[in-house]
Image (tube, grey):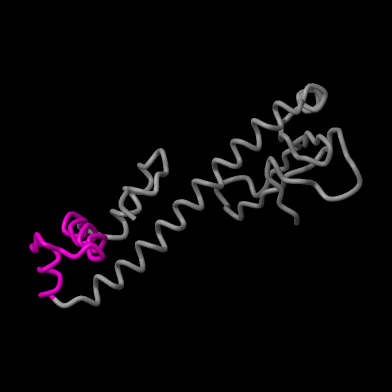
């Protein structure tokens, strides 16, 4: 079974139009109906999956009226989603590296990071990390909650 998302290029010769697809689900639950079939219609513009809808007429309208301006808006949204994912992935990788470095410090080194006012410039990042660790009850879960609350995905927040 092939999986496509809106914005994906459908392989094959140049296709513009509507394709009918049946979605099948098997619940394997005695309390519910065992399965269901749902017809959906794929709106495809120059091999680009632009939408999935429940009626043929709606899919046909989408294909007929789809424009390069809408293509730009679609890819801008996908691009922003990709940037958000990359930012969060890098933030998690960086956090894990710092966490292992922090856990490798002795108790005295941790106290020095927290209490020394004349910290070396290259230790400032670890000082900020150590201060954050003091606020967290469950470090990784708390970090992920904080990461999900970020909106502008700047590189100057707590990584």
Indicate the quadrant containing the C terminus: top left, top right, bottom left or bottom right: bottom left
- Image position, residue 68 (x, y; %): 75, 28
Quarter of the rendering containing residue 60: top right
Q: Relative to residue 70, is residue 120 drawn left or right?
A: left
Q: Relative to residue 130, is residue 16 drawn left or right?
A: right
Q: Tell me the residue at 35%/62% (across/down).
A: 95
Q: Tell me the residue at 78%/28% (across/down).
A: 59
Q: Tell me the residue at 59%/42% (across/down).
A: 79
* 157 is higher (above) or lower (below) than 70: below
Q: What stretch of residues is rendered in magenta?
A: 107-136
From the viewer's side, name the closer residue of 1 and 97: 97
- Image position, residue 134 (x, y; %): 16, 58
Magenta segment, principal secondary structure? helix
Quarter of the rendering containing residue 55: top right
Q: Is residue 152 magenta?
A: no
Q: Relative to residue 148, is residue 3 drawn left or right?
A: right
- Image position, residue 135 (x, y; %): 17, 54
Quarter of the rendering containing residue 53: top right
- Image position, residue 36 (x, y; %): 69, 43
From the viewer's side, name the closer residue of 15 and 90: 90
Q: Is residue 131 magenta?
A: yes
Q: Relative to residue 93, is residue 114 drawn left or right?
A: left
How many discs appear?
0
* 2 is higher (above) or lower (below) than 65: below
Q: Residue furthest right?
A: 13
* 65 is higher (above) or lower (below) than 31: above
Indicate the quadrant containing the N terminus: top left, top right, bottom left or bottom right: bottom right
């Amino acid at each position: 079974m092939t999986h496509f998302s809106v914005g994906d290029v459908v392989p094959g010769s140049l296709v513009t139009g509507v394709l009918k697809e049946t979605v099948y689900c098997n619940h394997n639950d005695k309390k519910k109906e065992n399965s269901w079939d749902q017809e959906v219609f794929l709106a495809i513009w120059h091999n680009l999956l632009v939408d999935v809808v429940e009626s043929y007429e709606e899919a046909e309208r989408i294909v007929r009226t789809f424009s390069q301006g809408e293509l730009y808006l679609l890819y801008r949204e996908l691009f922003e989603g990709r940037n958000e994912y990359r930012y969060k992935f890098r933030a998690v990788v960086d956090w894990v590296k710092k966490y292992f470095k922090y856990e490798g410090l002795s108790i005295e080194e941790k106290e020095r990071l927290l209490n020394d006012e004349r910290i070396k410039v290259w230790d400032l990042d670890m000082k900020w990390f150590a201060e954050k660790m003091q606020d967290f009850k469950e470090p990784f879960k708390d970090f992920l909650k904080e990461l999900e609350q970020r909106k502008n995905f700047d590189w100057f927040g707590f990584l």
